[in-house]
Amino acid sequence: MFDKLKKWLLPDDEEEQEEVRLTNQALVDQVLVSFKETVERESFNKRMMYDCSYLILMRPEDYKHAELRLAGITEGILDEFYDYINQRKTQYPRYEPIGNYWDFQYCPSERGVDNREIEPGTIQVISTPTSEKSWSELSSEHIKVSVSSKHSKYSKYDLNPTTFANIDILSKGHFRVKFNKEFLEGLATAQHLPSGAGSSTPVDKLATIQFVLNKQRYSFPMREKHLKITKAIDGMTSTATLLCINEPSGSLQKEHIMIRYDDAARAFYIALFADAFVNEQRLELSRVGENPVWHPLKSESSIVCGIFQLDFKALV
């Protein structure tokens, strides 16, 4: 009887207590907002200024949910950072950071550095240009927030070493990634889309091609309908339609792979000019100078050339 009376008197009580969850996309978006604000506030003349060391506070329940996803989320954040740096490079051509590494530390906390409660579904971002100390050490000196530095390693989890090859996992929730100027320069040309009355090139990415070199993971955006993938050759640089990779094992050949997107079919196709396995299958090869032999390409595919692997992911 009491429960019925309470529900009648307070009908919205349960609705108001509905859980608000911090999604992965919301986490990326909120960190990106902080990054953009820093660039706008600190940049001057031709010098782009931004922070590379981040402390990201979130509610304990949100941290628990995101814990095993944080390495991948960090890569997503850096993809957005690099895209934005490329967008602003015309105005600020001196874009190199002060430090050599991106440093991200995610911590559970009920309250932010201003002692205000962190609302469900939100984060608080604190950043500096670079730091030789971890945020755990700095917090004990300057930031009055509970930050645990006793996280266990990820060793007890079954993690794919290829996926996190470019990330140093210092501890659970703490990641360091070397700033990659060379790949950023490779993206610069691809970022500028050709103009013209006959151009129907979409603005957004059609797909991404990811690969690992020297323990660094790279993500190349496919923005044009045709993309050729080849080993790096002197005098050739990556463009919107050409991906040159300095692959040291010799597995990648000249003009090894072509990928195209068909608007009408809304599908991707691949042509091979040297041996490779696509989703563990050997495909018929094309001959240079002749019409390519096109094969359907799944929206998420692995392309293995010798010991070198490319991961393809469609975004349309």
Image: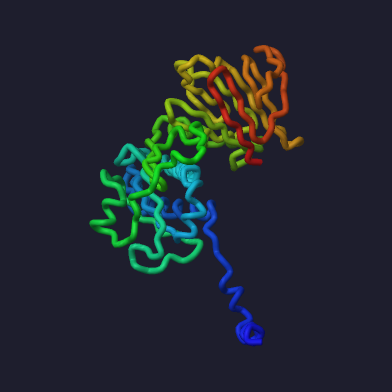
> Is residue 67 shown to the viewer in this render?
yes
* Quarter of image, res 285: top right
* In the image, residue 116 above or below residue 249: below
The percent coordinates of residue 125 (x first, y second) are 39, 56
Question: How many numbered callouts?
Answer: 0
Name the residue nearer the viewer: 152 or 37: 152
Question: Is 223 displayed left or right of 80 in the figure?
Answer: right
Question: Is 36 displayed left or right of 229 in the figure?
Answer: left
In which quadrant will I find the N terminus? bottom right
* Quarter of image, res 311: top right
Name the residue nearer the viewer: 276 or 16: 16
- Which residue, as the protein is rendered here, is positioned at the far right? 265
* In the image, residue 91 above or below residue 287: below
Residue drawn at x 28%, y 56% is 139
The percent coordinates of residue 303 (x first, y second) are 61, 25
What colour-coding does the image apply? Answer: rainbow
> Is residue 189 shown to the viewer in this render?
no
The percent coordinates of residue 94 (x first, y second) are 34, 38
- Which residue, as the protein is rendered here, is positioned at the far left? 141
Residue drawn at x 48%, y 16% is 249
The percent coordinates of residue 41 (x first, y second) are 35, 54
* In the image, residue 135 above or below residue 92: below
* In the image, residue 91 above or below residue 247: below
* Quarter of image, res 293: top right
Question: Is 97 displayed left or right of 218 in the figure?
Answer: left
Residue drawn at x 34%, y 39% is 101
In which quadrant will I find the C terminus? top right
Question: Is 64 displayed left or right of 10 in the figure?
Answer: left
Name the residue nearer the viewer: 261 or 281: 281
